[in-house]
Image (cartoon, rainbow, N blue to C red):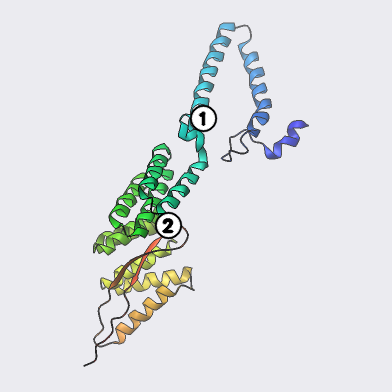
Amino acid sequence: AFFLVLAPTSSVVATSDVLQEHRIYLSLASVVSAVVVVADRLVGERRRLGALLLALTTLALIARTHARNADYHTEFGMVYPGDMRQALTIVARHEFGQGNVHHALELFDQAIAELRDDNARAEAHFDLANLFAQRGSLGEAHHHYLRAIGANPALAAAHNNLAVLLAVEGDLAGAAHHLEEAIAYNPRHFWAMITLANVHAVSGREAEAIALYERVLDLIPQLEAPRKALERLAERRSSADPPPLELDTTVRLAPGYGDAFLLLAPRRAVSQP
């Protein structure tokens, strides 16, 4: 009856919620007891075999326990176990925002060095790159976007933001490549679609640009940027001498996750004779 009451909030498989993992011990008690009974029946009078199995099992459990508690192998891990490392990056962002760049970089470096998961390291590099981009330090941002992609090539946001910097540098072919990668990894990444459409538009590939603008509007009809871009292209087609399209090289970061994007440059004022 006790285990039946415990069952709804217990598991014989470790959960990702560290606040609930203590429940695994009680729920495993019956499983372990059953394994011990079955093993005792199989071994029977063969005590040497039983002793060998016990020794091997003990060594295996010691190894697994050591690996499971890897978060606590360093002083840093004791202070910032598991998801608490996210708190460290929050502190680093605050220090960066206060202008304490050197201290912020030390905190980021410490967090990145301790993170064993490639995806987590990629996210940390991405966060740091965004902070540099917000300060206008595009060279450092470029470096950390590359580090993020190196740690996790499927991180669409890093491909997108790196592409924006490449476009600002004038490498439209490189920008288009990384924008296409971002969309391949995340087919609903509308910021990448908008920037890629703008790159196509200024490169003279208006058909591809129009298709992407319309795709974005199918996803998010209320977005103004693709609608205004379509109006610009329609005006160009009806003009006998359309002015060239250019990218606005102001790097913008969307609220929330920090996806970068580029818009088309405003229309140039026509000088009157």
Q: Where does residue 36 sit, x and y in percent of width and height? A: 64, 18
Q: Which mark is residue 186?
A: 2
Q: Secondary structure at mark 2?
A: loop
Vertical side of 128 occupied by 179: above or below: below
Residue occupying the point 42% across, 45% down: 119
Badge 2: how crowded within 10 Å, few (<14), some, or many (20+)? some
Q: Which numbered disc, 1 or 2, marks the residue closer to the eye?
A: 1
Relative horizontal placement of residue 176, taking residue 45 as reference (left or right)? left
Residue tagged by mark 1?
69
Vertical side of 61 occupied by 249: above or below: below
Vertical side of 84 occupied by 164: above or below: below
Q: First in sequence: mark 1 or mark 2? A: 1
Residue 200: quadrant of the picture? bottom left
Relative horizontal placement of residue 90, taking residue 41 as reference (left or right)? left
**Amino acid, disc 2:** Asn
Q: Secondary structure at mark 1?
A: loop
Q: Where does residue 213 sit, x and y in percent of width and height? A: 39, 72
Is residue 178 something one can see in this rendering? Answer: yes
Q: Where does residue 242 sit, x and y in percent of width and height? A: 26, 83
Contact? badges 1 and 2 (CB < 8 Å): no
**What is the count of numbered marks?**
2
